Every structure is written in C-alpha cells, then in structure tokens.
Amino acid sequence: MKNLQKGDKKLLNAWAFYDWANSVYTLTIASAVFPIFYEALFSDRDHYIDVFGMHLKNSALISFITAFAFMVVSFISPLLSGIADYVGNKKSFMKFFCYVGALSCMGLYWFDLDNIYVGLLFYFLGLLGYWGSLVFYNSYLPDIAFEEQQDRISAKGYSLGYIGSVILLIINLAMIMKPKLFGISGTDGEAAMKAMRYSFVMVGVWWILFSQYTYYYLPKGSKETGQKLTKSVVFNGFKELKKVWALLNQNIPLKRYLGGFFVSSMAVQTVMLVATYFGAQEIQWETKEQSTIGLIVCILIIQLVAVIGAVLTSRASEKFGNVPTLIFINGIWAVFCALAFFITLPTHFYVMATVAGFVMGGIQALSRSTYSKLLPDTEDTASFFSFYDVAEKIGIVIGMCVYGIIDQITGSPRAAIVILAIFFITSIFLLRRVHKKDVSN
C-alpha cells in the first residue's frame, strides 16, 4: 500500500480505528467478564489457593499479578518510546505487542485452577501486549496528524474504542445470559462459563481482525527510517524522564500537582481494576446468574455515566477552576470508598457504580488537562506526558500492592477499599498547595 500523506483523512481514520480494535481488552478482560469468570472458578472452594509457595487469597493474587505487570510496563515503556522515536519499523513493534496481547486473550480460554501458572502467564502477557502496543500506537500521532488535527482524531479514537468495546460486551452478555441460543451446551452454570471462555477468544479475534485496517494504512515508521538501534537510542526514554524530573524543581506548581495526581491515581486506578472482584465477593447476589448479569450491567453503567461525568466536570472546571474541581472530585471519591465498607445489596452496588462512573470519567479527563495547563512553554511535551504516564503506572503498582496486601491479611477487600479513602484525602491536601492562579483556564 502506497503511504498516504500526513493529515490524510484515510490515514487518520485508520489510526483512530485501532482504538476500536484494542479497547475490547480493557472492557472484557480487565473490567468485566474475566474478573467474574475468575471469581466463579472459586465458587466450589474457599477463596484461597496455594501458588508460588504461598497460601494466597484469589483477589490478592490477581492484584499482585496486575501490579507486577504494570511494574514491567512502567519499566519497558521508556525503553519502547526511545526505540519508537528512532527506529523506522515501529509498525512491526506495534504488531508484535498487539498479537502477543490478542493471542494471550485467546489463551485465557484454557485458564484453570489446575493449570494456574499458565493461566496467570496469559493474563500477564495480555496486559503487557495491550500497554506495549499503545506505546507505539500513541507515538504515531505526531507522524500522521498535524498539530491542529491531533486533539480531534485522538478524541475520535477514544469514541470508537468506547463504541466497539460496548458492542462486544453486549454480545458477550447475551451469550452468558442465554448460552443455549448460541448453541453452547451444558448445565446453566457450565454453559455460562463456556460462554465466558468464548468471549476471551472473541476479544483476541476482534483485536487482531480489526487492527488489520489500521496496519494496512499506517506507514512503516517515522521519517527517520533505518537508523541503527544503539544503546543510546534504547535508553533515550529514560534520559527524557530524568530530564523532566530535573525540570520539576524549576516548576513548583507542576511538581506539587504531580504529587497530588500520583496519590490520587494510586486509588482511582486501583478502584477501577478491583471493582468487579469486590462486587463478586462482597455483594449478596441472590443467584450466580444475577451476580454475573448484575456485575456486567454495572460495568456498562460506569462506561455510560463516565461520558456524562467527563462533560459535567469539564463545565465545572470552566466555572470553578481545575484545581478546586479536582479537590471536590477527590472528596467524592473519599466518601465513596468509606461508604463502600457498608454496602451489601445489589441496589447499593448499582448506586455506587453510577457514582463511580460520574467521578471516574471526570477525574481522568480533568487530571490530564490540568497537567497540560501546568506544563512549561516547551515543544518537548512528549517527554512530559511520558513522565505522566509512567507516574500513573507506578501509582497503579503501589495501589494494587496495598490493596492486595490488606485483602490478604484481613481476608476481606472492604478494609482495603476504605484504606484507599486515605489516598484521596492525602491527595486533597497536596492539591490544596497548587494555587488556582497557577492553572490557566
């Protein structure tokens, strides 16, 4: 395929369409179906398993594996970004991580407690493949779009990802609810579990199939093709992070904001990653079927409400300012985590999911835009956002480890969720040090 010119509509749409392809991973695997499936594996036994020479609670185990995966991602992201900036075959790297992630999702079909190590490896590689491919996917944006096009086409990618992932999740939900209609045999429980396994395969197929449209039009790499891969190139990403760290001492408002963002991100991302596991273990569902359907519906509610929350938060920030709005949202999150200790009924969980959706969509969008407004006058924004992304991932590592340790010690995720409220309160105090006048609106 002849390379299209930078800014070409076909090229931009092809790039954005990768979000349609890969976002099914975050919704089906990370948030909805896999957590329900994983919890169901322990339905006929207690929540503990002997693994890695330890007696671990199932939700603590998956928290530790997730934390380890994000730790690896936070380390390799600067390496990959350094390579992406200089090597002319970034599409090959993007394909590699895409296929590793997609095939690992398919591999989850065989996830079983009798072969727990293989299953956990597929889970780990799926997460690694998803985030690894994103490094190269994001690095294409300045190559294929002019500056004035980047915001719009990036937003289009997010929109496509949201639509595609919800469509597949609805199909998966129908399969799980009515497996017989899809030709899936077995008792109700067995058929539902089979349907979940099939949904993992569907994620991998969807991811690979729809990414081909993106690969067909994307160029091989940047204009700087064919450069030799040297040690200097590989570690360039770390050099950029070190440079940003040094510059933070010259920008005190940005440094203060990053402290508040880092602590807040620990808690927000952890809540998002463990919400389904919490709902499966702690909510008093009447039947297993109600549990499965209810949890997936809650995830859909969060997705839908998050869009509204992002819009309302944007308007609130225009009226009251970014920092006061972020402080208010962190306050809501703190109350949310405190109240989570007491919820037991499905109705409670639906209400909490709605609240979580509102503040989740708002805090993520506003955190990034606030960071952007605090950046110094520089053309090297990529290094600053790389630093932001790595900080966010390290926050996830700490948050998931804290959650997993408390869950393991106490035997209940309720105490772990309450502890997360302390992170939000800490974030409020840190953000109060950032003056409203420092953030231009």
Image (cartoon, grey):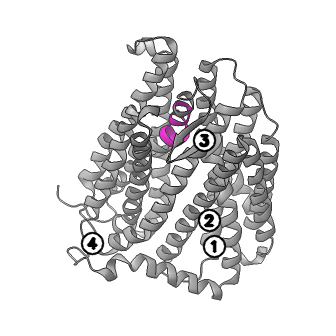
The residue at which mark 4 appears reads as: 87
Q: Separation of disc 2 and disc 3 at Cα?
A: 33 Å
Residue 359 visible in the shown view: yes
In the displayed structure, would residue 153 be above or below residue 80? Answer: above
* Picture quadrant where residue 427 is located: bottom right
In the image, the segment drawn in magenta is 27-37
Mark 4 against mark 3, which lies toward the viewer?
3
Disc 1: which residue: 373
Q: Residues within 10 Å of mark 1 (few under 14, many from 20)?
A: some
The residue lying toward the viewer, choosing from 404 and 262, is 404
* Element assignment for label 3: helix
From the image, tell me which residue sits under label 3.
59
Q: CA distance from mark 4 to mark 3?
A: 40 Å
**Secondary element at tag 4:** loop
- Could you give the CA–CA distance between mark 4 and mark 2, rounded to whole angstroms? 30 Å
For the residue pair 41 and 351, the one nearer the viewer reads as: 41
Q: Identify the residue position indicated by label 2 in the image.
A: 369
Q: Earlier in the sequence, mark 4 or mark 3?
A: 3
How far from the left and from the top, in percent, is residue 241? 50, 78
Nearest-to-viewer mark from 4 and 2 = 4
Name the kind of residue labelled 3 in the image. Answer: Ser
Contact between labelled residues 1 and 2, with CB atoms less than 8 Å apart:
yes
